[in-house]
Image (tube, rainbow, N blue to C red):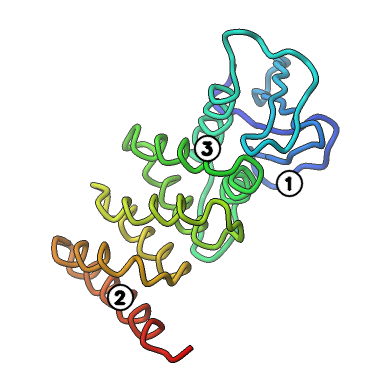
Amino acid sequence: MSSVDTVRPVAEPTFEGSATTVQPTPRREWVFESTGSSARDEEPFAGARGMGGSTEKPPPNLDGPIRLRAIVRALFRAAHDETFHDGMESAFSRGVCLLVETEGTAAVEVIGELMTESPRHSEAASEALRWLGWVEDRPTYAARLWLIEKSLQHPSPRVRDAAGIGISAMADPHAIPPLKAAIARETVAELRDDLKQVLSEIEGLDSCPT
């Protein structure tokens, strides 16, 4: 297998312009492909939020959570070959957002696990945090906010900065205490100023009359 994996559904349109593509099918079937290889391993799975799934019996040693981890891991691996630009969508960000919308809180949890698994994932983790705040999915709101707040403690300044961006996008007053704590311990002056700006914005919203 090559070093670049792609994840795509069976017989559905895919995003173009990158090594990674993710799109659900009505039966929630996903295909893992290795770029430049004819290897093909189809693994159907049911959505984490009970959205339906394949009628085929899954292998006994590959349950839903393991499949989900495999999908997220493939996304993170492929992200190493992407170049991210602030404010612009990427194949990785679309894949992350789509997984959260289709797989729910379970996807948020697995993304959080992968973010802290290796320093090599810092760039992808930053991209994920920047977009998780913009996902319009109420059932995963609390989990996404928790993950973004927790990421304010990440050892990578890049990830901490992305967490600030994610919190700014969510603009939730519940994030004020974690933000204040992050500002107090932040050692990077520029990042500390950015977090102060996010705090000021959210406090301003919190004080507005409803």
Q: Residue furthest front?
A: 210
- Looking at the rendered structure, the kind of residue marked 1 is Glu
- Residue 48, position in %: x, y? 62, 35
At 49% across and 64% down in the image, what residue appears?
Answer: 86
Q: Which mark is residue 106?
A: 3
Q: Earlier in the sequence, mark 1 or mark 2?
A: 1
Which residue is rendered at x = 14% and y = 66% of the image? 184
Mark seen at residue 177 = none
Q: Is residue 159 left or right of residue 136?
A: left
Q: Badge 3: few (under 14), some or many (20 or more) residues near its Cα, within 10 Å?
A: many
Tell me the CA gap for discs 1 and 3: 26 Å
- Label placed on residue 199: 2
Helix, strand or loop at label 1? It is loop
Q: Amino acid at mark 3?
A: Ala
Disc 2: CA contacts within 10 A as few (<14), some (14-19) or many (>=20): many
Mark 2 vs mark 3, foreground winner is: 3
In the picture as drawn, the residue positioned furthest to the top comes out as 60
Residue at the image position 23 percent from the left and 70 percent from the top: 190
Which of the 4 image quarters holds residue 171? bottom left
> Which residue is most to the bottom?
209
Q: CA distance from mark 1 to mark 2?
A: 37 Å
Label 1 vs 3, first from the N-terminus: 1
- The percent position of residue 193, horizontal first and vertical second, equals 24, 74
- SS assignment at label 3: helix
- Tell me the distance, in whole angstroms, between the alpha carbons under discs 2 and 3: 29 Å
Closest to the camera, between mark 1 and mark 3, is 3
- Judging by the rendered image, the residue that carries numbered circle 1 is 16
Q: Nearer the viewer, residue 30 or 121?
A: 30
In the foreground, 34 or 49: 49
Q: Amino acid at mark 2?
A: Leu
Assess whether mark 3 and mark 1 are in contact (beta carbons under 8 angstroms): no
